[in-house]
Image (cartoon, grey):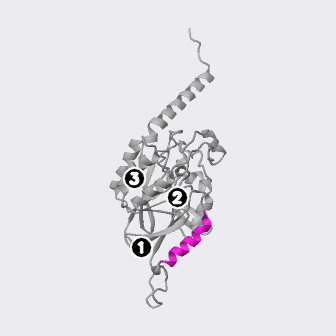
Amino acid sequence: MTARLTPVARIALAIGAAGVAAFAYGSLVERTRWTLRRVDVPVLPPGAEPIRVLHLSDLHMAPWQRDKQEWVRSLAALQPDLVVDTGDNLGHERGIEGVRRALEPFRGVPGVFVNGSNDYFGPVMKNPFAYFAGPSRLGRRASRLDIGELHAFFDELGWQDLDNTATALDLRGTHFEFFGVDDPHKGYDRLDLITAAIDELRAEDPLGDETWPDEASAVVRPTVTVGVAHAPYQRVLNSFVNHGAQLMLAGHTHGGQVCVPGFGALVTNCDIPRDQVKGLSVWRHGLRSAFLNVSAGLGTSIYAPVRFACPPEATLLTLVPTE
């Protein structure tokens, strides 16, 4: 006759079974439950036409991930006016193969991008509990990835590199200034270069000068200013707000990747508050503020293929006029 389990043993068995079920769901179901999040952001000047911005982040692409590639390809049917890619596109030494397949339909659509650490370095096995001690660090065994080939492909698409620089675009009659930084998670951001980049950008724009061509016929062009980074560290967000950003976009956090229903993310892998680890919020610094969209991203490391209460996502932001 089998001995009866004690109450403690029954509880332990139930917890273990629940853990196994949760892991199975997170790795087999939710990890591939691709989600499109739609939000409206009131940042355009009055009377401007709405602008559709597709925010992609953290693909962590491996060549065999065909379902993910096909889902990303399908987003081209949304006909975005702009694509913003906030990094960590590569997840394997041959990840560029999958990135090419996923993003080829966006050729000719205006786009901007910044680097994430996994565009430089390949994934390595890590202790997941180490994230509770603070942001992750580069593993000694991390292999170098071909970021040059990734940038060459983005250039083929017609996308502009925002790593520690600035650029301008006109979209549906609205003038945009974009500035961004290289990956803050690895300390590659050069916030000291942003001021000079913005000044140079504005110096080349005659319509940005309120006294041009003369005082009597001054032309003022309403401008929307957007800051882009991979990892939303507070130092970066504060600097962006100080430089006049009205909208900021980032990724990196995976939305926590493994969350607790009703509580949210357990970790952020940077110093952003947990309640702003994903989605649209308002970031305040001093007397200024800006909308902040943090993408939960579309992928995971191939060594940690699980999500829970945090499905992979892309975001379609519809920029609309302010009231």
Camera-side mark, 1 or 3: 3
**Which corner quadrant holds the C terminus?**
bottom left
**Which corner quadrant holds the N terminus?**
top right
Assess disc 2: are there few (<14), some (14-19) or many (≥20) residues with their C-alpha within 10 Å of its C-alpha.
Answer: some
Q: Residue at x 62, y 47 (%)?
A: 138
Range covered by the magenta-colored residues:
190-204
Up/down of 317 relative to 175, above or below: above
Q: Mark 1 sits on what residue?
A: 46
> In the rendering, at what x and y percent does residue 119 appear?
52, 51
Magenta stretch containing residue 282, yes or no?
no
Up/down of 267 relative to 212, above or below: above
- For the residues labelled 2 and 1, the Cα–Cα distance comes to 22 Å
Q: Amino acid at mark 2?
A: Ser
- For the residues labelled 1 and 3, the Cα–Cα distance comes to 33 Å
Up/down of 218 relative to 227, above or below: below
Residue 103 is tagged as 3
> In the rendering, at what x and y percent does residue 293 appear?
50, 58
Q: Earlier in the sequence, mark 2 or mark 1?
A: 1
Q: Amino acid at mark 3?
A: Leu
63 or 241, which lies in front?
63
Q: Amino acid at mark 1?
A: Pro
Label 1 element class = loop
Label 3 element class = helix
> In the rendering, at what x and y percent does residue 172 appear?
37, 69
State the predominant SS element of the stretch in magenta. helix
Mark 1 touches mark 3? (CB < 8 Å):
no
Camera-side mark, 3 or 2: 3
Left or right placement of residue 29 versus residue 138 in this view: left
Residue 281 is tagged as 2
Which residue appears farthest toward the right when viewing the image?
133
- For the residues labelled 3 and 2, the Cα–Cα distance comes to 27 Å
